[in-house]
Amino acid sequence: MGNCGAFVRTAAVFLWLEVCLVGCDITDGNTEHLKREHSLMKPYQGVGSSPSSQWDFWGSTLVTSSYVRLTPDERSKQGSIWNTVPCHLKDWEMHVQFKVHGSGKKNLHGDGIAIWYTKDRLHPGPVFGNQDQFLGLALFLDTFRNDLHGMDRSFPYISAMVNNGSVSYDHGKDGRSSELGGCSAEIRNREHDTYLAIRYSKGRLTVMVDVDDKNEWKECIDIGGVRLPTGYFFGASAATGDLSDNHDIISMKLYQLMVEHTPEEENLDWTKIEPSVSLLKSPKDNIDDPTGNFRGTPLTGWKVFLLLLCALLGIVVCAVVGAVVFQKRQERNKRFY
Ligand SMILES: [Ca+2]
């Protein structure tokens, strides 16, 4: 039996190794693919003071060494922060660490934060401090319920919208008519860190949240058939109205995803793509997931090799364990005869 125990232990170690290769690097993604020119990180060196800074800010935005406050907990404020470098990655993943907090009691606070990937930057307006009828992608972290008929969902509510410049965001309905998907998430006045991840790869938009201090992503939105061009800008904005909150961005980290495209895809001019969503295509049509793990660890060559090696060893170990167990059973059975 001792040998079998050792086999089981070995198998367990390999199993752990396998799981770990996929899931251990789960806090901040893979620095290997972090794109600094599109990332905003503490202590925000040069932001707002140096002309070479890759981030501009506007409105009520206040940059300290530990957070970027888009709005203070005061009425009628609007602020935004924008990357100055257009993003030419075809496949990317943005991790946003944020904090929404204030003295307002339940339901007496607002309005929320929006994360943008748009053609225009620094265009103040009525949609969480940014322009309406934008071109590109928006993620709304809406903390105030405007639509009293929409009681089937709880707030705060996170939703996504893709716009080709022709659609207006309907505040009165909390953007429901134009949303592609969404989820409720308790993002306000939390003691711990709160995160949002937006992944765009091969026409698939996936949004995950990590707001329960469990250090794991929870799916919020997953849709296929989304077309976004390259060359747009990342940004974040927030607004308060009659009700308010502090809307803080702690970091925005952009990761490049290593995804292969066909030569035809590569030859396209990706800057010419019009933002759109083909609603005929269900998310299930788009399940190929070449990068495996969501949290910023695109599988590089050696990882794939190690995984395959582990899988192979796992199979061998299982076969051997199975053979030993079978043999023992045979022996035991023999004794009954
Ligand atoms: Ca709202």
Image: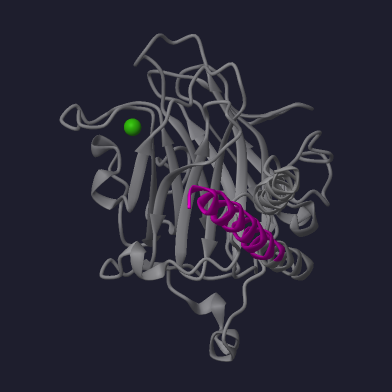
Q: Is residue 324 magenta?
A: yes
Q: State whether residue 113 appears in this view.
A: yes
Above or below for 108 versus 265:
above
Q: From the viewer's perspective, is residue 246 above or below residue 231?
A: above
Q: Is residue 257 left or right of residue 243?
A: right
> Residue at point 68% right, 59% down?
317
The N terminus lies in quadrant: top right
Q: Residue at x 47, y 44 (%)?
A: 130
Q: How many marks?
A: 0
Ligand 1 quarter of the rendering: top left
* Outermost residue, left side: 149
What is the x, y in percent for residue 170? Answer: 27, 43
Residue 80, given in percent of the width and then of the height, sits at: 58, 39
Is 337 in front, or is 77?
A: 337
Q: How far across and down, in percent of the image, does residue 314 sit? A: 67, 60
Magenta region:
313-337
Q: Nearer the viewer, residue 66 or 82?
A: 66
Q: Quadrant of residue 219?
A: top left
Q: Is residue 25 above or below residue 164?
A: above
